[in-house]
Image (cartoon, rainbow, N blue to C red):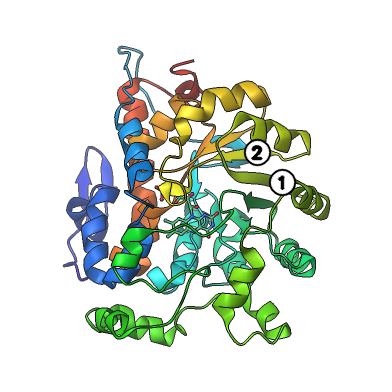
Amino acid sequence: MRFRQAKNITLGGRRFRGNHMSLMNKYPRLTDLEAPAARRIPKFVFAYLDSGTGQDQAKDHNRAYLDGIELTPQFMRGRVNPDLTTKLFGHSYNAPFGVAPIGLSSLIWPGAESILGAAAKAHGFPYILSTVAGESLEMVAKAAGEMAWFQLYAPKDREVMTDLLRRAKENGYETIVVTADVPAPSRRESMRIAGAPLGSRGNSSFTPRVIWQSMLRPQWAVRTLLNGGARFRNMEPYAKQASADNLTKFIGEQLNGSLDWNYLAEIRKSWHGKMLLKGILHGQDAARAVKMGIDGIVVSNHGGRQLDAAPSPLTRIGSIRAAVGADVPLIVDSGIRSGLDVVRALSAGADFVLLGRAFMYAVAALGNKGGEHAATILLEEVRDVMAQLGLKTIEDVKQLNR
Ligand SMILES: Cc1cc2nc3c(=O)[nH]c(=O)nc-3n(C[C@H](O)[C@H](O)[C@H](O)COP(=O)(O)O)c2cc1C
């Protein structure tokens, strides 16, 4: 996609680069990037990114719940210059949001992990690398620096688990996120209908239909071929050691349904940094996790991709807070598409927010510029909403409805 180089422009005392202005004028919201993303990547890849499961009701409910949250402004509090600094686990981040882990992100757009990692580093918010991403822990540590967190799908083989954690530690990762909410692969019907062979958990043969869909997106196809196709660089060394001839089958066997409470305790013992548990919706699970030393809970329904009757995470925040007490950070994702949604989630009890698909739509639509543009939109939107509400700090936002 090409934009004519415009001159620098000054508006209301702020200077905007021409390029930034034209991109911001064309796509001022993250949702403006969904349709361009669909046009730029093959249909089956977009379906993998976009789909929920079943009738997509959980996915739709996530949105409906957020859309229903109203925020009541108060006025005449003087000039508001919002400060987005957010304290979490002893760190100070420049924003109250981060990038959720996305498996196979390099197949959605080649190099997506480094693109988003670099944006996270530039703006000072976390980027969470999936166990089953395309790029490796080592590559993303270079791009994201201290902003890199690692998401662990617990491998059946304990040696694989300890080695992944060793690599995370040696590469400077301080925080891991263990995902609990994939006890089995889900059906993801709309992805099947689109012909997607994707996933570390499914059949991955490339059908003529998939090849045809790929040929209709030549830029994606060439870049993907140059990038080595569907890679799982974090897991490849272990498949090699195990002489597995089918990588996706090996990964599926290692990662499907292996996590239970005993295993979680083992991981806790093996990891000395901060450790979060992701995908929790029940207060009892949250309380049990905290009791065994988990530092924070990611309240999530996996973007509505696992169980179509799963509650929207924000409906569970009150009971989870009651179960874990006031001090445990509750991080929320699923359905967040804007800075307004970030503020809504914080006002509804979240301490921090993650976005999955929204960042990926941006990268799929804009390639290298996608991470930076998504970050810029979100930061501007959060600032704008805080100013409209007359709120100066993230702490003020959290107190809005409490
Ligand atoms: C394409 C895709 C792949 C995902 N892969 C992972 C993963 O590898 N590990 C994980 O913990 N969550 C994964 N998730 C869930 C996200 O981390 C996050 O919970 C979800 O995307 C939040 O919803 P949102 O996309 O509406 O923001 C994935 C989600 C999507 C859309």
**Image vertical order of residue 252 relative to residue 74, above or below:** below
Front residue (pair 164, 281): 281
Circle 2 Cα neighbour tier, 10 Å, few/some/many (<14 / 14–19 / ≥20)? many
Q: Residue at position x 23%, y 48% from top?
A: 28
Q: Amino acid at mark 1?
A: Lys
Residue 98 pos. (x, y %): 50, 47
Front residue (pair 204, 295): 204
Q: Quadrant of the N terminus?
A: bottom left
Q: Are marks 2 and 1 in contact (CB under 8 Å)?
A: yes
Residue 25 in sight from this viewpoint:
yes
Q: Amino acid at mark 2?
A: Gly
Residue 139 pos. (x, y %): 58, 72
2 or 1: mark nearer the eye: 2
**Image vertical order of residue 334 relative to residue 249, above or below:** above
Front residue (pair 88, 391): 88
The image's mark for residue 296 is 2
- Badge 1 element: strand
The image's mark for residue 255 is none
Circle 1 Cα neighbour tier, 10 Å, few/some/many (<14 / 14–19 / ≥20)? some
